[in-house]
Image (tube, rainbow, N blue to C red):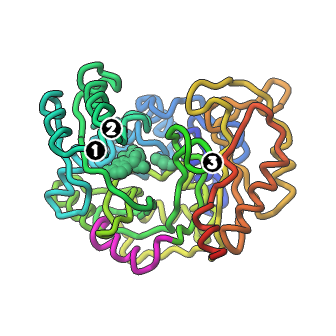
Amino acid sequence: MKILVVGSGGREHALCWAIAASPLCDKLWCAPGNAGIAEEAECIGIAADDVDALVAFAQREAADLVVVGPEQPLVMGLVDRLAEAGIKAFGPSAVAAELEGSKGFMKDLCTKYGIPTAAYGRFTDVAAAHAFIREHGVPIVVKADGLAAGKGVTVARTLDDALNAAEDALIEEKFGAAGAEIVVEEFMEGEEVSVFALCDGKTALPLATAQDHKAAYDGDEGPNTGGMGAYSPAPAMTGALMEKVMKTIVQPTIDGMAAEGRPYRGVLFAGLMLTDEGPKLLEHNVRFGDPECQVLMMRLKSDLVPALVATVDGVLANFDLRWYDDAALTVVMAARGYPGTYEKGTVIRGVEAAGDADENVTIFHAGTKRAADGGLLASGGRVLNVTALGRNVAEAQARAYEAVDRIDWPQGFCRRDIGWRAVARETA
Ligand code: AMP
Ligand code: GLY
């Protein structure tokens, strides 16, 4: 098969790594890719949201499968356009991608189909939003309806913060069109976990569980980020709990989307809060998590390609996936300053040697490029994902940090406590 992966982050590196290992793949491209991905795939200079150019490329090269990493091109209808051109593509259609593209749509679906989630209101009018906030009190959560690159959510602990967040979105247009409507919802207390499932429109096949670390600094301090590290499995997610999540959240979502005439095909990434009243949905994403995908790919024993094809073809009902029992953990190395402003083009040394020193370690690139002399340069906020396998999370963690310490990058930083919850559970 000739396969095109769309995207340029650590998630797409992990996907390319898994796809390149498949005996079914004889040609792999990535658009636009990065310096690490270039080891696995031919990188082509097309941006991930340049739908026209991606469709034209896939047609010209007669790609057999296109795998879309990020949400933006999905919401823009890349998969629909490819399907019209007769090209198989992994990921939801534009109307199905609204599950992530509109938080209001997702919440209304939950109401209609009885999926447990926080109580909420949808608002375009700031006075109405303010009245709702005053009525419910704090803590309360204010969310831009549309895609805001992970910045659209305010967990407000004071009334002022909540009122201001509503005003920022609706009056100041802080998130542009994405914030012209907001969702205001009840604050939920608990531990967060991510659940992933391949969905073919009817059947949902659960993947392994994972836990992300959203805050920039140790101890879950500092600003919210795209994710500073992850591990799998998430011990909080027991088999019984997983069954409950599939039955009360994932399958009703798939059934509801089918009933709405928006069959969901692709990977569904449900962000959950484990509350005292049971698991509740925080949000749906219509793609793999980044960096959660990196730990899932490390633990996947089965060939990824047939699973992707079965998802697109609607034949997951009789499909099965094998996983390694080992735990996987990934540490994100980011440029100092991330998620705020940071320097680009700084030199990173010793990455290959750090990866070669331990066969349990794989280093995925999230934001790198090659200098003219072949050296490695940082080109983004999140730059490397140092990923390791181990018999348990503690061992994977030790191996990952050993590799981190071999990398020479003075302008980079990472959290030193990725996996702390799981390690504390293991030692208890
Ligand atoms: P989201 O982008 O919707 O996942 O929100 C970003 C983060 O805000 C989540 O990962 C949670 O940590 C937090 N969050 C979102 N909604 C709620 C809620 N209703 N209650 C508590 N925390 C929330
Ligand atoms: N790591 C969280 C996300 O991909 O949205």
Quadrant housing the N terminus? bottom right
Which image quadrant: the C terminus? bottom right
Mark 3, Cα crowd under 10 Å, few <14 / some 14-19 / many 20+, is: some
Q: What's drawn in magenta, residue-wise?
A: 236-250
Q: Are marks 2 and 1 in contact (CB under 8 Å)?
A: yes
Q: Is residue 24 left or right of residue 351?
A: left
Asked whether disc 2 touches disc 3, contact meaning CB atoms under 8 Å apart, the reply is: no
Q: Which residue in the structure is indicated by mark 3?
A: 218
State the mark number for residue 158: 2
The residue tagged 1 is 138
Q: Quadrant of residue 420?
A: bottom right
Which x, y percent locates residue 151? Answer: 42, 35
**Nearest the camera: 204 or 122?**
122
Residue in view at x 79 percent, y 26 percent = 371
Judge whether residue 87 can be spotted in this image: no
Report the residue at 27% width, 41% height from top: 102
Q: Main secondary structure of the magenta part?
A: helix
Residue 326 visible in this rendered orientation of the protein: yes
Q: Is residue 137 above or below residue 47?
A: below
Residue kind at label 1, given as amino acid type:
Val
Q: Nearer the viewer, mark 2 or mark 3?
A: 2
C-alpha distance separating marks 2 and 3: 24 Å
**Compared to 168, does 358 lie above or below?**
below
**Which amino acid, mark 2?**
Thr
Q: In the figure, residue 334 lies in which quadrant? A: top right
Q: Please provide percent x and percent y for residue 16.
A: 61, 51
